[in-house]
Amino acid sequence: MKRLTSYSECTHRPETGTMVCRWLREVTPAEMRRSYEYLLAEAQGVGSRRWLLDMRRRNEEDPETAQWLHDEFMPRLAFHVSGPTFLAYLLSPTHLGRVDEDALAREHVAQLQRSVHVALFSEESGATEWLGQQAGKI
């Protein structure tokens, strides 16, 4: 795993064509944006359109970053990466439960799916399996 900073690790798995990014602690909105920018640059460099984003160590909601993702990052991702992109988010069961219960969060996830394909998981095996199933769609 390539350590990006003290708060995240990102790497490319060439055998599956997947970019993997793990956040190691709660991060500020600026740190989260830097992580996504780095991930986009790395993914473009290796041609990866399947991402595993492990946020299980992050449980705090961040409306500022969510808005940035929706308004700025996801449209750029769709523009700069040719073809569909698949993002599997790993969330803690507590965080995933809040997303399931919160209508606003569900609406936000649905909006993201218009630009890219997003799925939420609490187990890495499910996320990895879903990403593998997307290989034929790339």
Image (cartoon, rainbow, N blue to C red):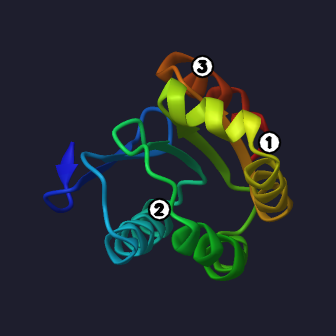
Tag 3's secondary structure? helix
Q: CA distance from mark 3 to mark 2?
A: 22 Å
Task: Give the quadrant of residue 101.
Answer: top right
Q: Is residue 82 left or right of residue 31?
A: right
Tag 2's secondary structure? helix
Q: Is residue 127 left or right of residue 28?
A: right
Between 74 and 50, which is closer to the camera in this rendering?
74
**Pointer 2 residue:** 43
Tag 1's secondary structure? helix
Q: Residue furthest left?
A: 6
- Of labels 3 and 2, earlier in sequence is 2
Q: In percent of the image, x 76 and y 60: which residue is there?
A: 112
> Whole-percent x and y of residue 70?
69, 72
- Of labels 2 and 1, earlier in sequence is 2
Q: Residues within 10 Å of mark 1 (few under 14, many from 20)?
A: few
Amino acid under label 2? Answer: Ala
Amino acid under label 3? Answer: Gly
- Of labels 3 and 1, earlier in sequence is 3
> Whole-percent x and y of residue 68?
59, 77
Q: Residues within 10 Å of mark 3 (few under 14, many from 20)?
A: some
| 58, above or below 129, in the image | below
| 31, above or below 104, in the image | below
Between 118 and 57, which is closer to the camera in this rendering?
57
Q: Is residue 70 left or right of residue 56?
A: right
> Whole-percent x and y of residue 11?
31, 48
**Pointer 3 residue:** 126
Q: Residues within 10 Å of mark 2 (few under 14, many from 20)?
A: many
Q: In percent of the image, x 70 and y 80: which residue is there?
A: 71
**Pointer 1 residue:** 137
